[in-house]
């Protein structure tokens, strides 16, 4: 494999430097060196039990917290998440739940009186959790039943879980280690009313003993099919009292008279601020799923190249997934830059800030859903490409597949979540239909114009067809068409209730609308980044990857182009198929260099077998032999063999 690497068509180290900011390249080196001095991985050998895996993950999360503090002046969110995804997914998630989700909620919907918790978390004196999901209600905020009843005499709240269906569930860090949590509950003032779902900061454990506080029942969820390092748990509250000041009061507060007073009057702004808490969490899922897909592709491509140095025919089928990994790698830090803008926008009280928040929410919900779906499919393709080798129990591919699939359901089930994107888009059509220019800060819908529907397909050759500007043009017609059709169908279904109307429409056009909208936005912003590449070879290969990303994803929409009259005849469909084959073929020779550019160092393989399949120097069979034969008990005769002999004698 090393010889093939030397014959690479472009310098993969230059690609790495382009994908990472120059400072991040050096930062990654320092992080990896730090880990090598104090490894946080479970030693290669016997598989840990569930309890051991949780213990290891907790220990590792503290090590990651230590690294985060050590490099606090330079470390980026993307660099940290990439590191943790390859080293210890469970540890990374546990650290992120406390340092990003818990702290993020305090900063977004809390006020100055809650900053003390932020400082305590930074010093490692408390560990945070985020408790929204309930056993019987999932993440459906309209159905949440946990109650926070205000007691005017004690000037505090009484938390109660009315039944098991209302128990807070699946919350990371809750099972064993969280001392504090942001808990969402219905704020009720007796003889006044229910003021809806509100966030509270709650101390659930003693910070010294880590025992649950009286009135708080906590259960560890036990073994799962994946992510067993993540410390998930269930919380039940029984007349548990908290001070009035524990209400995160950015949106509203209880005054001295015991009345609920809104701090933000505009309902749109209220909604936007509430949703801002989840923006970082959903982009974190994008980073994690892209990192999982990247890791799987590194293993699969290197394994296949090792089997056939001239290029394994199966590699070609992985090229679209490699394109997704590259697009996601470029997309994630670009969108994360918006977090800084988000903090500034939250301080403003004008129409532009509300518009930006709504646009960012539409992008984040779609990004989480679509990249997690694409990563799920890509990891599965890598498993199948490596055939029987991938199904060895300790293969990194099998671990990745199990761990990664959960990304499709937590932080919002994808099919439900992506409706939020289509809901936002649907509100725009009446203005577009009137000819009004739709203008939002990020420019994700600036192309919307009903006149787009009058355009048709005009391309004279395949090179023109693969041009990024033309690909964006196909998407713009498609999005406008799907938006109009979704709106028309929505009107026809008015006789049904609203929820059913949305669900029926979602089955037809609205899911496709959300997916097309997001893929167009992704190509739009990633193409701008690609143009910044000074190296012609780097820019050329990235352009091919982005073109493949666009055309491969357009496949699923081909019937709409014919249905809406954008194309006639077979040429458009033929160009779709032929250009995918051409781009796959052209990129296949670059596959090894492309995975080398986004791979993590070999030393951070999860297990001996995963390390063997994806080892950069090849020799997978020698390493696989060593890994298998060094396991405990592989040459021993089990005690139950004698029972088999007795059974055979009775035949």
Image (tube, rainbow, N blue to C red):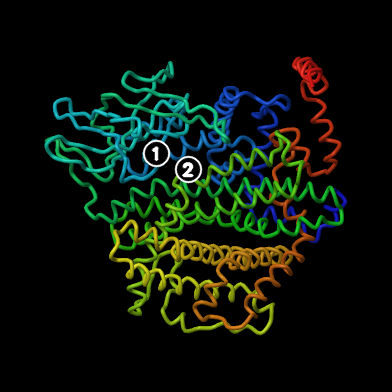
Q: Quadrant of residue 649?
A: top right
The quarter of the picture where the C terminus appears is top right
Q: Look at 65% across and 48% down and name the residue there.
A: 379
Q: Quadrant of residue 542?
A: bottom right
SS of the residue under disc 1 = loop
Q: Is residue 365 above or below residue 241?
A: below
Is residue 310 shown left or right of residue 524? right
The spot of residue 494 in percent (x, y) is 29, 66
Q: Which mark is residue 133?
A: 1
Q: CA distance from mark 2 to mark 1?
A: 9 Å
Res 26 visible = yes
Near mark 1 (Cα within 10 A), the count class, few <14, some 14-19 or many ≥20, is many
Check whether the beta carbons of the residues at disc 2 and disc 1 lie within 8 A of each other.
yes
Q: Is residue 148 above or below residue 370?
A: above
Q: Look at 19% across and 38% down and name the residue there.
A: 254
Q: Which mark is residue 410?
A: 2
Is residue 219 shown left or right of residue 430? right
């Amino acid at each position: 494999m090393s010889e093939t690497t030397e014959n690479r068509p472009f310098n993969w180290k230059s690609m790495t430097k382009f994908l990472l900011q120059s400072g991040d390249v050096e930062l990654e080196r320092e992080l990896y060196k730090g880990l090598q001095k104090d490894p946080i991985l479970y030693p290669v050998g016997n598989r840990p039990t569930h309890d051991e895996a949780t213990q290891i993950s907790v220990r590792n999360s503290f090590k990651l917290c230590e690294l985060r503090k050590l490099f606090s002046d330079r470390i980026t969110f993307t660099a940290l998440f990439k590191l943790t995804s390859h080293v210890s997914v469970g540890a990374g998630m546990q650290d992120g739940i406390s340092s990003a989700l818990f702290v993020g909620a305090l900063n977004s919907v809390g006020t100055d009186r809650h900053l003390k918790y932020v400082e305590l978390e930074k010093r490692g004196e408390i560990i945070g959790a985020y408790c929204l999901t309930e056993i019987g209600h999932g993440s459906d905020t309209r159905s949440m039943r946990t109650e926070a009843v205000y007691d005017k005499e004690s000037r505090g709240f009484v938390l109660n879980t009315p039944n098991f269906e209302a128990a807070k569930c699946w919350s990371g860090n809750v099972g064993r280690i969280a001392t504090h949590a942001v808990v969402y509950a219905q704020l009720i003032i007796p003889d006044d009313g229910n003021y809806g779902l509100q966030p509270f900061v709650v101390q659930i454990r003693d910070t010294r003993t880590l025992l649950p506080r009286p009135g708080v029942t906590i259960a560890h969820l036990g073994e799962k099919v994946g992510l067993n390092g993540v410390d998930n748990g269930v919380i039940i509250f029984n007349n548990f009292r908290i001070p009035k000041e524990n209400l995160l009061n950015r949106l509203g507060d209880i005054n001295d008279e015991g009345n609920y007073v809104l701090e933000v009057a505009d309902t749109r702004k209220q909604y936007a601020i509430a949703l801002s808490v989840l923006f970082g969490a959903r982009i974190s899922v994008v980073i994690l799923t892209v990192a999982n897909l990247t890791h799987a592709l590194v293993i699969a491509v290197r394994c296949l190249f090792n089997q056939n140095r001239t290029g394994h025919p199966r590699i070609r089928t992985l090229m679209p997934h490699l394109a997704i990994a590259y697009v996601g790698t470029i997309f994630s830090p670009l969108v994360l830059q918006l977090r800084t803008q988000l903090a500034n926008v939250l301080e403003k009280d004008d129409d532009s800030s509300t518009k930006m928040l709504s646009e960012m929410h539409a992008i984040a919900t779609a990004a989480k859903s679509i990249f997690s779906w694409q990563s799920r499919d890509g990891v599965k393709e890598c498993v199948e490409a490596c055939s029987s080798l991938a199904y060895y129990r300790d293969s990194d591919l099998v671990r990745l597949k199990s761990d990664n699939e959960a990304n499709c359901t937590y932080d919002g089930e994808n099919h439900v979540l992506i409706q939020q994107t289509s809901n936002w888009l649907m509100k725009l059509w009446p203005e577009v239909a009137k000819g009004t220019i739709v203008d939002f800060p990020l420019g994700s819908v600036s192309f919307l114009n009903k006149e787009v529907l009058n355009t048709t397909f005009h391309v004279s050759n395949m090179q023109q067809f693969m041009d990024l500007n033309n690909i964006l043009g196909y998407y713009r017609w498609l999005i406008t068409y799907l938006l109009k059709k979704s709106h028309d169908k929505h009107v026809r279904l008015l006789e049904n209730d609203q929820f059913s109307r949305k669900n029926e429409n979602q089955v037809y056009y609205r899911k496709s609308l959300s997916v097309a909208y997001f893929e167009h936005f992704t190509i739009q912003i990633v193409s701008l980044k690609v143009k910044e590449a000074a190296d012609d070879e780097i820019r050329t290969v990235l352009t091919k990857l982005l073109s493949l990303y666009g055309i491969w994803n357009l496949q699923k929409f081909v019937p709409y182009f014919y249905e809406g009259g954008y194309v006639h005849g077979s040429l458009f469909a033929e160009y779709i198929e032929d250009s995918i084959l051409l781009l796959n073929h052209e990129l296949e020779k670059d596959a090894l260099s492309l995975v080398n550019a986004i791979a993590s160092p070999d030393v951070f393989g999860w297990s001996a077998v995963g390390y063997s399949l994806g080892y950069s120097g090849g020799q997978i069979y020698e390493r696989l032999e060593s890994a298998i034969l060094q396991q405990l008990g592989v040459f021993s005769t089990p005690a139950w063999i004698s029972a088999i002999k007795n059974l055979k004698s009775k035949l």
